[in-house]
Each structure stands twice: as structure tokens, then as C-alpha cells.
Amino acid sequence: MKLPFLCALVLLAFGCASAQDVPPFTEDCRTGTYPPNGPTFLGKVPWYTVNLDLPPQERWSQLIYSKKKELLNLIQAIKDLANAFVPSGKIVKLVDEDLPLLVGSLPYPFGEEIKGIAHASGMALGEVMLFNIFYEVFTVCTSIVAEDKTGKLLHARNLDFGLFLGWDIKNNSWTITELLRPMVVNVDFQRNNKSVFLSTNFAGYVGMLTGIRPETFTLTMNERYSLDGGYIGILEWIIGKRDGMWMSFLTRSVLENATSYEDAKNQLMKTKLLAPAYFILGGNQSGEACVITRARVSCLDVLQLDIKQGRWYVLETNYDHWKAPFVLDDRRTPAMKCMNRTTQENISFKTVYDVLSTKPVLNKLTTYTTMMSVSEGKLEAYLRDCPDPCMPW
Ligand SMILES: *[C@@H]1O[C@H](CO)[C@@H](O)[C@H](O)[C@H]1NC(C)=O
Ligand SMILES: *[C@@H]1O[C@H](CO)[C@@H](O)[C@H](O)[C@H]1NC(C)=O
Ligand SMILES: *[C@@H]1O[C@H](CO)[C@@H](O)[C@H](O)[C@H]1NC(C)=O
Ligand SMILES: *[C@@H]1O[C@H](CO)[C@@H](O)[C@H](O)[C@H]1NC(C)=O
Ligand SMILES: *[C@@H]1O[C@H](CO)[C@@H](O)[C@H](O)[C@H]1NC(C)=O
Ligand SMILES: *[C@@H]1O[C@H](CO)[C@@H](O)[C@H](O)[C@H]1NC(C)=O
């Protein structure tokens, strides 16, 4: 079996105990955290431009040159970790021999972009492919779209990354999460010198997890763990059953090319995927927001924002909304509690940042918080930290 280390890491999840609902790991809803300040705020995310008019191989060069050192540190840590789980050099063989072959079978423009990133960073092609797989697989998150009293939508998310990727006992932190923070970038994707979409992303990743198409829609993706999950999809794809799309490649295509909320929704519901996912979509007018729960082939459910029924926001973590969250990982209840307490009258960037700053919605894995307003075409992103005492997830 290929990628056995991914499976081993996931199995670990079920062996861990949690104290997520006990103080000091949880706290009363925070207030006054915005503008971002204090120990949970590590800085603003820097902006870069990617010119879509350039050939895919050249688009990322400038960004990659400026993040080269961080990229090499991260890939070394990923390889060390993989080797620790699967000794005997099998991982090295996978990365050096098998993954480069995969790049050629990726749809346009993704394979070409990955080749360009390998070239600009001086890394082996298989290594760039490896962390594109990692980003795809190890994210856990909280996403919210809310409508204010004037009918404007705001979309916010915490990106939690690096679960099970090497707990650093000395520093009380996740090794990969620490190395990932310097990789967080905001990217302004342009054609003809005009913004097509904006995204908070990781340097070296060609898929998208968080983005806005100004005046049109906002989109985030959350991981959905399921038995028919990402690992099966990715394994099948590696052995040649390549009829599904990478989830974050779909998100990227939609941000780049979908022309309306309805068009985006339709593509997110119907495109066959490699693995299950949640897509959280916000439109540009009242009532346009939903959580799309996807299996690989079918769309299982669409939860729609519905003011008439009193549902003025939709919120998704990493569990189907009609089921209880995994008992060791309930970020949904605390986030909803704080949203309910905020009320629709008072929802804004300021108050949604408070919600996303409340433990355990904020936890040791939280890498960044992004807030987007479709009507203002605005994206704000902040690097986060969760000093002790704080839940590992
Ligand atoms: C962990 O802590 C040690 C010393 O306390 C420090 O040298 C090292 O850079 C830290 N590592 C990370 C990833 O923060
Ligand atoms: C974009 O702007 C730059 C400098 O402002 C200019 O040199 C270039 O020709 C413009 N490109 C397009 C496609 O308009
Ligand atoms: C919302 O999107 C529609 C369809 O793309 C567009 O016609 C309309 O002008 C947009 N409205 C706003 C307020 O941006
Ligand atoms: C978006 O559409 C353009 C034009 O059809 C195409 O060249 C480009 O590859 C598409 N982008 C993605 C990410 O699929
Ligand atoms: C928040 O409010 C919604 C709608 O009134 C309700 O269904 C939900 O149970 C509340 N959740 C919490 C945690 O207070
Ligand atoms: C909403 O904000 C106003 C003004 O800041 C405040 O007086 C009011 O108590 C807030 N309402 C809630 C439910 O927090």
C-alpha cells in the first residue's frame, strides 16, 4: 500500500483523549479581540500577486523565491516525520520515484504550476507534490457565513492545520503547524492587471482553501472525514482511477472561473471529487449562503441560510451538521454559542473575530483567521497562536 503513513496518522486520532470542554481549555465567549492584538495574534498575512496571464510554470516564481528557505524547512520536517512513521526508506522511494509521475497526470494548469514551483524552489518535483497532498489532507477548520441586518454577508474561517503531525513536547506545539505559519500568504490573482479573486493560501500550494471573488461570492473548504474518505480517494487516484477532482483544485477552478453564486454552487454540488468535503459558500445578496456536504460522487445535503426561519448564519467545522460532532472534537457548540450570543444585530468583522478567538474554536492547530466581505471585495487575514493553556486541537 502506498502512503501508509497517512493512514497510521489518522488511526492515531482515535487513540487520543481530550479535555476540550473543560477549563482552562475552553472559555467564555471572547470580546474586544479586534483589531487583532495580544498573544493570540502573530501578525498580518503578507500580500503577493500571481499573474494568471503568465504561463502556469512561471506564475508562482516570485512568491516561491521569497519563501524558499521556509519551504525547504517544511519539506524536511515532513520527510523526517514520514520516515519516523515508515522507516526503511519507502517514503523516500515514493517521493523520488512515484510522486513525480503523478504530476504529469494532474489536470491543467495544476501539473504545470507544480513543475514551476519545483523549478523556482530547487526542490524535487516529488517533494512539491508531497506537500500539495499534505495540505489537501491535514486541515481541520471552522467556517462561518453570516448575514447582517442590512443583508450584507460576511464569511470567516479559522484554518487549523497539522493535526497528528508531530507533537513537540518541549514547546507544547505541533511541529508542522509551527513551520507552516511563515508559509501563510494572501494572494491576489490577476488577469489584465485586475483582481480575479483573492485567497489566503500556503506558499507552494496550487489548490485553494479560502477565497473571495469580489462582488460575486466567497468560498472556503473544510475537510470531511468519512470511511470513503480522502485516503481511499487519493490511493485510488495514485493507482490510476483518476476520474475525480482534487477538492482544493475544484475550489480553485470555481474561484477562478465561476461567474455567479449559482454557477459556483452548481459546480461544487455536481463535480465528482477524489474525496468527501464541505464547501462553505457565500453569495453577494441576502439569503445567499450555504454549506454543501459532499460525498465523492454525490451531494448529500445543502444547508441554506434562511432568515425567515431565524437561521441568519451557517457554520461548519468537520462534521455533518445533522449529526453530533465527534465527542472529542466539538468546536461547533462553542462557536454557535458565541454566534448566538452575538446576535444578528451585532455581527461584524469585529464580533466574528471574537468568536474565532474563543477556545477551543481557537486551538494549537489554528494557523490563520481570514474574514471576507463580498460586497466590499475585502479579505483580511491574521496569523494566530494559542498560548498555553490551550487544547492541542
Ligand atoms: C522549540 O523550542 C526550542 C527551545 O526551547 C527552540 O530552540 C526551537 O526553535 C523551538 N522550535 C520551534 C519549532 O518553535
Ligand atoms: C500591467 O501593468 C504593468 C505596469 O503597470 C504594465 O507594464 C503591463 O503592460 C500591464 N499588463 C496588462 C496585461 O495590461
Ligand atoms: C451579484 O451578482 C450578480 C450576478 O453575478 C450581479 O449581477 C450583481 O450585480 C451582483 N450584486 C452585487 C451587489 O455585487
Ligand atoms: C479557467 O478558465 C480558463 C479559460 O478557459 C482556463 O485556461 C483555466 O485553466 C481555468 N482555470 C482553472 C483553474 O481551471
Ligand atoms: C444557537 O441558535 C440556534 C438557532 O436558534 C439553535 O438551533 C442552536 O441550538 C443554538 N446553539 C447554541 C449552542 O446555543
Ligand atoms: C449590540 O451592541 C450594542 C452596542 O455596542 C450593545 O449595546 C448591545 O448590548 C449589543 N447586543 C448584544 C446582544 O450583545
Image: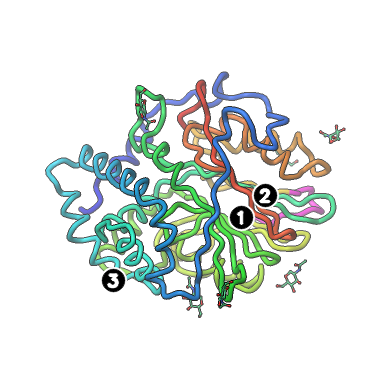
**Residue 291 got which mark?**
1
Percent x, y of residue 89? 14, 46
- 391 vs 194, left or right, is left
User: Relative to the observer, which residue lies in front, 214 or 345?
Assistant: 214
Residue at 76%, 36% in the rendered image: 342
Q: Quadrant of residue 238?
A: bottom left
Residue at 47% x, 50% y: name it. 224
Q: Please say if the residues under marks 1 and 2 sit with CB atoms less than 8 Å apart.
A: yes
Residue 387: where, in percent of width, then height? 51, 25
Query: Residue at point 63% right, 59% down?
Result: 218
**Badge nearest the viewer, 3 or 1:** 3
Q: Amino acid at mark 2?
A: Val
Indicate which disc, 2 or 3, sits on the residue closer to the N terminus: 3
Q: Assess disc 2: are there few (<14), some (14-19) or many (≥20) residues with their C-alpha within 10 Å of its C-alpha.
A: many
Q: Reply above or below: 264 against 2.
A: below
Pinpoint residue 21: horizontal percent, then vertical percent: 56, 25
Label 1 – label 2 distance at C-alpha: 7 Å
Structural distance between the alpha carbons of marks 2 and 3? 38 Å
Direction from residue 282 to residue 62 in the image, left or right: left
Q: Is residue 139 above or below residue 212?
A: above
How many numbered discs sit on the rendered protein?
Answer: 3
Q: Which-is-in-front pick, marks 2 and 3?
A: 3
Q: Are marks 3 and 1 in contact (CB under 8 Å)?
A: no
Name the residue that disc number 3 marks. 104
* Amino acid at pointer 3: Gly
**Which mark is on residue 314?**
2
Q: Secondary structure at mark 1?
A: strand
Judge whether residue 361 is colored magenta.
no
Q: Secondary structure at mark 3?
A: loop
In the rendered structure, which segment of residues is drawn in magenta? 301-312
In this figure, which colouring scheme has been used for the structure?
Answer: rainbow
